[in-house]
Amino acid sequence: MTDMTETYARCIKSSKQVRWDLDADVLRGRTLDTAHDFMPRGLSFVDELDFLTGPERRFMSQVQGRTYANLFGVIERYINAKVLELARDYLFGDQVALEALVRFSDEELKHQEMFRRVEQLAASVMPAGYRCVADGNAIAAAVLGKSTWAVLALTCHVEIYTLVHYKSSIASENLSPLWKDVFLHHWKEESQHAILDELEWKREDARVTPAERDRGVDELIELVGAVDGVLQAQGQVDADYFVAHGTYTPEQAQTLRDAILKAYRWQHIVSGVKHGQFVGLLAAMCTPAQIERIQTALRPLLG
C-alpha cells in the first residue's frame, strides 16, 4: 500500500467515525430562535458597528448567517461536481482512493441539504424581502471551467477555513444552539475533506508542467476575484435588506455596506488564505514570483 493509499484509508476510517445524520444529530426537530445570533460575532464583525443596538446586531448576525448557509450551498455544488470528476481517475485503479472520494461526494451532498434546510428555517422566522443572488449552477460552471490545479487550490482553501469558522462558533456566547451544531458537524467532515483536497492538489501539481502551473496561479487569482464579485453582490442586497428594516442615516447605511463586505471577505477569502496550512501548501508548490502575484492580487481584499 502506498503512502497516499494509506492516507486515503485513514480518511475513510475517520469518515466512518465522525459520520452524522442530518435530522438525528444536527436539526433534531428544532427551529431557529431569533433571540440568538446565527453567525458568530468573530465572523460577523457586528460588534464593530457601535451605532447598532443589541437587537440590531443580532439581526445583522442573522442576515449574515442566512447568507452563509446559501453561499455554502452554492460552494459545495461545484466541489461535489469536481470530486466526482476526480473519482473517475480511480474507477479501475486504487479502490481505496475511490471509496474515499465517493464518501467525500456523499458528505458534500448531505452538507448541501443541511444548508438548504437551514435556509428554510431562517426564511420561516425572518422578515420577508431577503434574496440570495448567487446562482449555484452558473457559479459551478464558471469554476469548473478553470484548470484542475486552480480549482483544487480554491477548494482546499475552502475546506481549511471551515476550521476557523468552527473555532469562532465555540467562542461565541449567544450563538443559536442549532447553528453551533451546524458549525460543529460541518467541520467534522470538512476536516477530512481538507486532507483529501490536499492529496489531490499535490497529485495534480506533480503532473502539471511549470507553464500549466503558472496558468493555474493566474486562474486561482481569477477565481478569488470571482468569489469577491459574488460577495460584493450579495453584500449589497443584504445591506439593503438590513437597512430596510431600520432607520439609518446615509452615512450609517454606507458603513453597514462596508462592514458586511468586510465580514464576507473575512469569512470566504481572508480566513482561508491567511491560514498557515494553506500558506504552506502554496509556498511548497509555487515560485516566489508566483506567490508575489497572488499576494498582490489579494492585497486589496485583505483590509
Image (cartoon, rainbow, N blue to C red):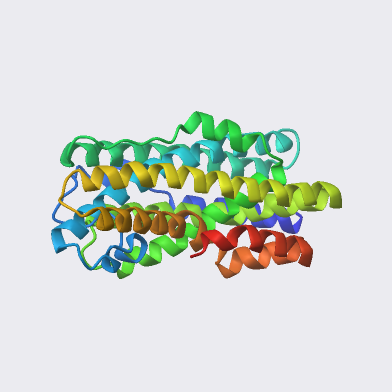
Residue 158: image location, x then y, percent: 53, 53
Q: Is residue 58 left or right of residue 158?
A: left
Residue 275: image location, x then y, percent: 55, 67
Using the rendered image of the protein, determine whether residue 152 is visible from the camera's viewpoint.
no
Residue at (49, 53) in percent of width and height: 190
Residue 291: image location, x then y, percent: 71, 63
Q: Is residue 198 left or right of residue 49?
A: right
The N terminus - image quarter: bottom right
The answer to whether residue 262 is above or below residue 101 is: below
Residue at (52, 63) in percent of width and height: 302
**Count of labels shown?**
0
Residue at (71, 49) in percent of width and height: 218
Residue 68 versus residue 48: which sits nearer the camera? 48
Q: Is residue 68 left or right of residue 221?
A: left
Using the rendered image of the protein, determine whether residue 246 is visible from the camera's viewpoint.
yes
Residue 239 versus residue 32: which sits nearer the camera? 239
The answer to whether residue 294 is above or below residue 68 is: below
**Picture quarter containing residue 198?**
bottom right
The answer to whether residue 73 is above or below residue 6 is: above
Q: Residue furthest front?
A: 250
Residue at (72, 38) in percent of width and height: 90
Residue 155 versus residue 51: which sits nearer the camera? 51
Residue 67: image location, x then y, percent: 34, 45
Residue 284 versus residue 268: which sits nearer the camera? 268
**Picture quarter containing residue 116?**
top left
